[in-house]
Amino acid sequence: MYVAAFAEFLSDEINIPSTRFRIDYLRKRYATLLWKYGMDKAKMGYVRDNDDPTRPKNDYTSPAEDGLINVE
């Protein structure tokens, strides 16, 4: 939340006030953004990350113990 607010201040080239930093406003704004994101996902029928298609498995296999060299 703080990072998003800080990035917005930087991108808009606004001076960052140290005494007028309204934490309650930022907290509500962040909660609203998360709620909107969740509602958009629900409207599209995409509810959770487990619905992602499976990713291909890595083809890497670790070498056998006798093929390793110990360098000390």
Image (cartoon, rainbow, N blue to C red):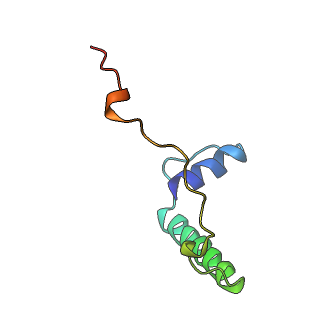
- The number of numbered discs placed on residues in the rendered structure image is 0
Give residue 11's position: percent from left, percent from top. 71, 45
Q: Along the line of sight, which residue is nearer the eye, 59 or 7?
A: 59
Q: Residue visible at 66% across and 78% down? A: 41
Q: Residue visible at 32% across and 33% down? A: 65
Give residue 37's position: percent from left, percent from top. 64, 74
Looking at the image, residue 69 lies above or below residue 10: above
Looking at the image, residue 28 lies above or below residue 14: below
Q: Quadrant of the C terminus?
A: top left
Quarter assignment of residue 48:
bottom right
Q: Along the line of sight, which residue is nearer the eye, 14 or 1?
A: 1
44 sits to left or right of 61: right
Q: Residue visible at 58% across and 54% down? A: 5
The extreme front residue here reads: 66
Give residue 15's position: percent from left, percent from top. 63, 43
The extreme left residue here reads: 72
Quarter assignment of residue 10:
top right
The extreme top residue here reads: 72
Give residue 3's position: percent from left, percent from top. 54, 51
Looking at the image, residue 64 lies above or below residue 6: above
24 sits to left or right of 13: left
Q: Residue visible at 56% across and 67% down? A: 30
